[in-house]
Image: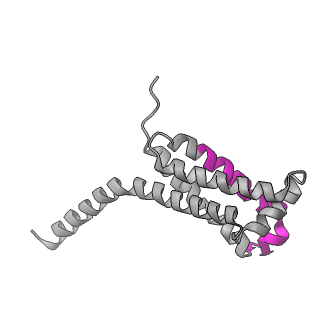
Amino acid sequence: MNIDQKLHLFDDKIIHWMRRVGVPFARFALFITYFWFGILKVIGTSPATPLVQSLLDVTMPWIPFGTFIIAFGIFEMVVGIMFLRKGMERLAIFFLALHMLMTLLPLFILPEITWQGLLTPTMEGQYIIKNIVFIAMGMGILAHLHPLKK
């Protein structure tokens, strides 16, 4: 076997292994992120708290922040758990889509917090923009689901 054949064989093995573990790893990564960030909100140590409060003040000022942040944290924890449970993927991805729509809002309605200049996000803006990765992971998981039976 020459070096080219060995390289192709190695490439084949890596690709097949990634196909086997890629989706479970994406599901686990979303669980870890959602659960971890959620529990930080519940226990009151989330660095996102000021951003969440600013967004709530602009969008739903009638909701008490203390109640909202705990409910929001629990919501994130539940979504995380849903990514681990077989059969819950579609619902988890639906909630991920809703969550992503809400988390993108500060880029547009709180520009003083999320942008420091033209196309230059603040740390908070970067935190939001990286959610594109979560959207892509959700799309990848959804793409590997079997269609619903008629």
Going by the image, does 64 lie left or right of 98?
A: right
Going by the image, does 1 lie left or right of 112?
A: left
Is residue 25 something one can see in this rendering?
yes
Let me know if residue 23 is in the magenta part: no
Is residue 117 something one can see in this rendering?
no
Question: Which residue is farthest right?
Answer: 62
Going by the image, does 2 lie left or right of 52?
A: left
Query: What residue lies at 46% left-to-right and 58% top-to-bottom?
Result: 28
Q: Quadrant of residue 119?
A: bottom right
Work out whether 134 lies above or below 150. below
Query: What residue lies at 58% left-to-right and 59% top-to-bottom?
Result: 34
Query: What residue lies at 58% left-to-right and 50% top-to-bottom?
Result: 79
Let me know if residue 99 is in the magenta part: yes
Q: Position of residue 4 (x, y in %)?
A: 18, 69
In this rendered view, identify the residue nearer to me: 116 or 31: 31
Quadrant where the image shows the N terminus: bottom left
In this rendered view, identify the residue nearer to me: 111 or 54: 54
Q: How many marks?
A: 0
Colour logic: one colour
Going by the image, does 138 lie left or right of 22?
A: right
Query: What residue lies at 57% left-to-right and 41% top-to-bottom?
Result: 91
Work out whether 87 lies above or below 64. above
Q: Position of residue 107 (x, y in %)?
A: 77, 63
Q: Position of residue 32 (x, y in %)?
A: 52, 62
Magenta stretch prevailing secondary structure: helix
Question: Which residue is farthest front?
Answer: 43
- Looking at the rendering, the stretch of residues picked out in magenta corresponds to 94-121
Q: Quadrant of residue 108?
A: bottom right
Q: Position of residue 13 (x, y in %)?
A: 24, 61
Work out whether 41 lies above or below 72. below
In this rendered view, identify the residue nearer to me: 23 or 72: 72
